[in-house]
Image (cartoon, rainbow, N blue to C red):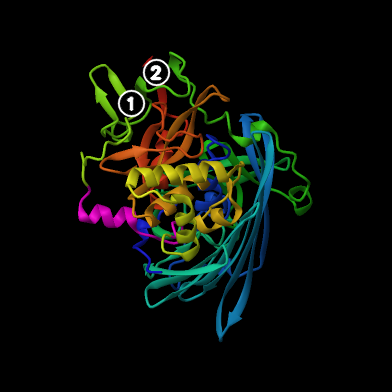
Amino acid sequence: MPLRQREKIQEVLRKAHRIVPAAIILFWLAMMGALIYREALIPWMRAGVLPPRAMKMQDLWMGVYTAADRDALERVGFINARSLPDMRDGRSGLQLGVTARIEMSVLFRKTELVFTGRAWIDADHGLSDFDFSLRSGEYDMRIEGHVEDGMLRAVLHTAGESLPFDFPVSTDLLLGGDFGFSALEAPLLEPGQEIYVDAFDPTRMSVGKARIICTGEETIEIEGQPIDALVIETTLAGMTTRAWVNRDGEVLRADTPFGFILKKTTPEAAMKPVEPTEAASLVRAYAIQPTGITPRRGVGYLRANFSGVAMEHLPPDDEIQFRTPDGWVIIAPEPPNGDSDAPLSAEEQKEYLAGDPFITVDHERIRDAMRRAVGDATEPWQKAISIYEWVYENMRKTPLISVPTALDVLRTMEGDCNEHAVLFTALARAAGIPARVVIGIAWSEKLEAFGYHAWPEVHVGRWIPMDPTLGQPIADATHIKLFHGGIDQWARLLPFIGQLQIEVLEIR
């Protein structure tokens, strides 16, 4: 199957059970490295500059915690990162390994996410190859790849399929990849020093520029002992993590946005059973409690004010969501009448009908399912409704933490908004209907708050939002779009988390 450019890779944000922000969990536990391993400190692996201290064996264990408040940490898992000096084909380098497990309760259901991986770092040429696997419930994803002639060549294995892809990378490529915890970090920075490096995340399949700066020195307490440490801030795609690192380059603690904290620990402490509570699920921690009028599911009109975020991050204007002098207005659109009010360009048609490793439009199993879902429907909107009904009625509404593909979802037929949106989008595109995944917020009666959510839009003369997770053939006016796009757009969600404030002025 031909693959699009990496910036076109469509992957939807994962939310746990209906409107739970598991996108945040996955974004930070997967994208920023092996379940947060990169959050501690991104290593500097420029060709030929592996520091001597890196060439030694390391076996580091970090506990992963959430913070209910400043003084109460709740353990939700562990990360074990290993580095072993080795020889390959007469060349020296490091064999790196990571094992991580995160356990959380998602609306009172225990969920587990397991990450394993390895990478080879050539002492003279940097990253050589890697192999990572991510598992949650019945979902499995594996990405293996290598660097060759300025290209990163990789294969995504999922749902019994192997999908190749590649894209150009800098010769200064670094993998977020020594996992942030071994001695293979940047040449030890002194206060005020900073560097910029290219960073690749195998779970995100893209390369970005990372800024690493040493902001000063502090004394912190680890296992009851005061330790002097350098404070290192790593910023990638708008995300900043603060880490405390000793003079040997070993990460002692890392604080991430959204409440995840990593602390050095022992293997025995790390491996103790985790008893996740509802507090650890981040369900309520990132729900947005509005002021003003209390919304309700099913409204056709909502007027609100948004604040707390920069002007450029305010929700976008379109036909059903727009700004007025009296606030933002969101309306549930009427069903399409067959006229083309806003036709797509040829380029847009191509983009929203195309397949990729996650939206596997051209796969025969997807096309078989599309034909079953569409049945006798012939008109685009009829097809969209038929696909909506098929997805809504056949998928089990199950909270998960995963990075699903349409093939994965079709195999398991379970999940929440992320799985529903991925499968619907693949089926709609396979049926010739332009479709895309929207990331935003929607009202949750259970939480009595807005929560981060994903749903599809289809273009049938104009864009129509549909929600096969919540059972709304046309999404109600509590669906507030923040942006649309694939995994390369995840960073755009971050400015909203913990910042977006909503005042509901009117509903009807």
Q: The residue under label 2 is which amino acid type?
A: Glu
Magenta highlight on residue 111: no
Instruction: Kindly report the distance in space between the C-alpha atoms of the residues bearing marks 2 and 1.
Output: 16 Å
Classify 10 Å Cα crowding around label 2: few (below 14), some (14-19), many (20 and above).
Answer: some
- Image quadrant where one finds the C terminus: top left
Query: Tag 1 or tag 2, which sits nearer the N-term?
Result: 1
In the rendered structure, which segment of residues is drawn in magenta? 344-360
Q: Is residue 195 visible?
A: no
Q: Is residue 153 above or below residue 443?
A: below
Query: Residue 362 in the image: x percent, y percent?
Result: 41, 64
- Near-viewer residue (342 or 444): 342
Q: Of helix, strand and loop, which one carries label 2? A: strand
Q: Does the segment drawn in magenta span residue 356?
A: yes
| Residue 180 image offset from top left, x and y in percent | 56, 56
* Residue 53 locus on image (x, y percent): 58, 66
Give the quarter of the figure containing the N terminus: bottom left
- According to the picture, the residue beneath numbered tag 1 turns out to be 331
| Residue 230 numbered tag | none
What residue is disc 2 on? 503
Q: Residue at x 48, y 42 (%)?
A: 389
